[in-house]
Image (cartoon, rainbow, N blue to C red):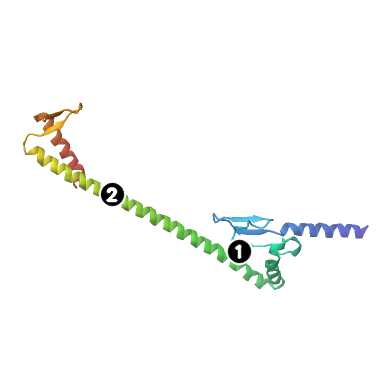
Amino acid sequence: MKRKQLFLLALACTWALGASAQWQWVDKDGRKVFSDRPPPQDVPDKNILKQPTLRGTLPAAASAAAASTTAQQDEAAPAAAAASAPSAGRDQQLEDKKAKAEAAEAARKQAEEKAQAERQAKARAENCARARQSSATLASGIPMAHVNAQGERGFMDEATRAAELRRAQAIMASDCK
């Protein structure tokens, strides 16, 4: 009976070893993914941070990579610490790439804002020039024609001329700075 219990205990222990077969990789969004299944085919090898080391639980495609990690496991504890250091470096590389991408995005937004400000400044300068020209023409006192709401052509009376002059001066006050 003791042998049977010992056998069941050993079987239970080996069964639990399958649960330690974990894959760890970084997905396309920069997040770490943990799974008992291998990553999708589109994940590059450089983004795979950890592979299972038990030969019995590995798929056939990953058996070559497992041979190198099994050799690392057989070494002493310092070798295991050295093996974990590159995975931290990969995280740092991903963080650096993410920071560079964020900096590039911020630079692009800043360039867009600068271009928008230049377009607005150009539009204000054009409005200012038109308002100055209109103001000079209206202040000259020569008879001016305009088109009314019905599309008929008529001459400006003094009230319309004064209203147009005030409008031109308001535009000059806001855009000619």
- Closer to the chain start, of discs 1 and 2, is 1
* Mark 2 Cα-neighbour bin, 10 Å: few <14, some 14–19, many ≥20: few
Residue 89: x and y in percent read: 56, 66
Specify the amino acid type for callout 1.
Asp
* 118 w.r.t. 89: above or below: above
> What mark, if any, has residue 119 been given in the picture?
2
* 84 w.r.t. 164: above or below: below
Hey, which residue is sitting farthest front in the picture?
152
* Mark 1 Cα-neighbour bin, 10 Å: few <14, some 14–19, many ≥20: few
Residue 128: x and y in percent read: 18, 45
**Can you tell which quarter of the image residue 10 is in?**
bottom right
| Number of marks in the rendered image | 2
Element under disc 2: helix
Identified at 21% across, 48% down, the residue is: 125
Viewer-side residue, 84 vs 160: 160
Identified at 16% across, 27% down, the residue is: 152
Element under disc 1: helix
**In this rendering, would 77 be left or right of 89?**
right
Identified at 38% across, 53% down, the residue is: 109
Report the residue marked by disc 1: 45
Specify the amino acid type for callout 2.
Arg
> What mark, if any, has residue 32 been given in the picture?
none
| Quadrant assignment for the N terminus | bottom right
Residue 58: x and y in percent read: 72, 61
Residue 156: x and y in percent read: 11, 30
